Amino acid sequence: MFERLDKLREEVRRCEKRRDEANERLKAAQAKLKEAEASQILSDVGALKLSPEEVANLLQLAASGQLAIPGATGNTTPDTTREKFVYKGTTNFSDDDEDENKEDTENEDY
């Protein structure tokens, strides 16, 4: 008579165990994601070659809405090969390859 109840209780225990294991896997996956995001942020900031003060200033401008990032609203152009940041009419490229490219094309014969 109580066999059915015992089976149902056992089923509940198995489900709880699977739930607990799934929660552990979820927490581990969330921790991996957080670490990967932090690593990507550090990599991106490092690629900009900015001082800590410049990074802080850039973040303040972005947070206040004074920094416009072309293409951020979905208007990307195919000829854009790098991000540029615009603030009050000035343009700063994220790397200094522009001068190198200019020198390469000056010496070419057509």
Image (spheres, rainbow, N blue to C red):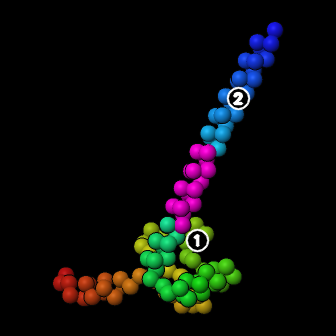
Place of residue 12 in the rendered image (x, y in percent of width and height, measured from the top left):
73, 27
Decide which of 36, 9 is in the foreground and name it: 9
Q: Is residue 35 above or below residue 71?
A: above
28 left or right, relative to 48: right
Within-10-Å neighbours for mark 2: few <14, some 14–19, many 20+: few
SS under mark 1: loop
Name the kind of residue labelled 2 in the image: Arg
Dominant secondary structure (helix, strand or loop) of the stretch shown in magenta:
helix
Q: Is residue 56 magenta?
A: no
For this orientation, the residue located farthest to the top is 1
Q: Is residue 25 above or below residue 7?
A: below
Place of residue 108 in the rendered image (x, y in percent of width and height, measured from the top left):
20, 84
The residue pinned by badge 2 equals 13
Q: CA distance from mark 2 to mark 1?
A: 50 Å
77 left or right, relative to 23: left
- Region rendered in magenta: 24-38
Residue ID at (54%, 67%): 38
Name the kind of residue labelled 1 in the image: Ala
